[in-house]
Amino acid sequence: MQGFADSQLINYTLERIPESEHKADAPQDRVQLFFSTHDVTVSGRRLRDFLRLLRDGKVAAVNTGNARYVNLRNDLPFVAEIKVAQVKVQE
């Protein structure tokens, strides 16, 4: 488990995943969160709502869920995958 303080968030991007249009349970959105030491990629559905909660300081933790439950709660963001990559220091 890794944790990052939201105060350390430098920037983020939100994009649609084009190949998800052909798969019912595939993640539709991808959010990239850029911190000073790590880049975090979150894939899922309704991630615009996730960003709104993050900006409002209402996100304490993010967990992934099984894709078969993606439509169980259509009023909440759903995270299918989280990838964390350490930023390489250039020498």
Image (tube, helix red, strand yellow):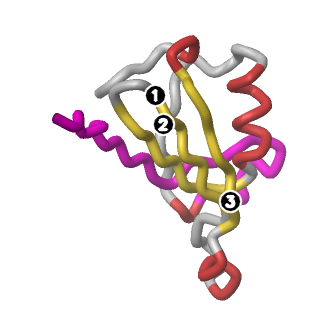
- Give the camera-side residue of 15 and 24: 15
The x, y position of residue 42, in whole percent, is 52, 48
Residue type marked 3: Glu
- Give the camera-side residue of 71 and 40: 40
Start-end of magenta stretch = 69-91
Who's the residue at 57% across and 12% down the image? 7
Q: Earlier in the sequence, mark 3 or mark 1?
A: 3
**Would you name the residue on which mark 2 appears?**
63
Q: Which mark is residue 15?
A: 3
The x, y position of residue 2, in whole percent, is 32, 25
The x, y position of residue 38, in whole percent, is 36, 33
Who's the residue at 83% across and 44% down the image? 75
Q: Quadrant of residue 30?
A: bottom right
Mark 3–mark 1 CB contact (< 8 Å)? no
Q: Residue furthest bottom?
A: 22
Who's the residue at 22% across and 37% down the image? 90
1 part of magenta stretch: no
Q: In the structure shown, which secondary structural element does the residue marked by tag 2 occupy?
A: loop
In this picture, residue 58 sits left or right of residue 69: right
The x, y position of residue 24, in whole percent, is 66, 78
Residue type marked 2: Asn
Q: Residue furthest left?
A: 91
Q: Which mark is residue 35?
A: 1
Q: Earlier in the sequence, mark 2 or mark 3?
A: 3
Residue type marked 1: Phe
Who's the residue at 66% across and 87% down the image? 22
As measured in the structure, the alpha-carbon distance from the residue carrying label 2 to the one carrying label 1 is 19 Å
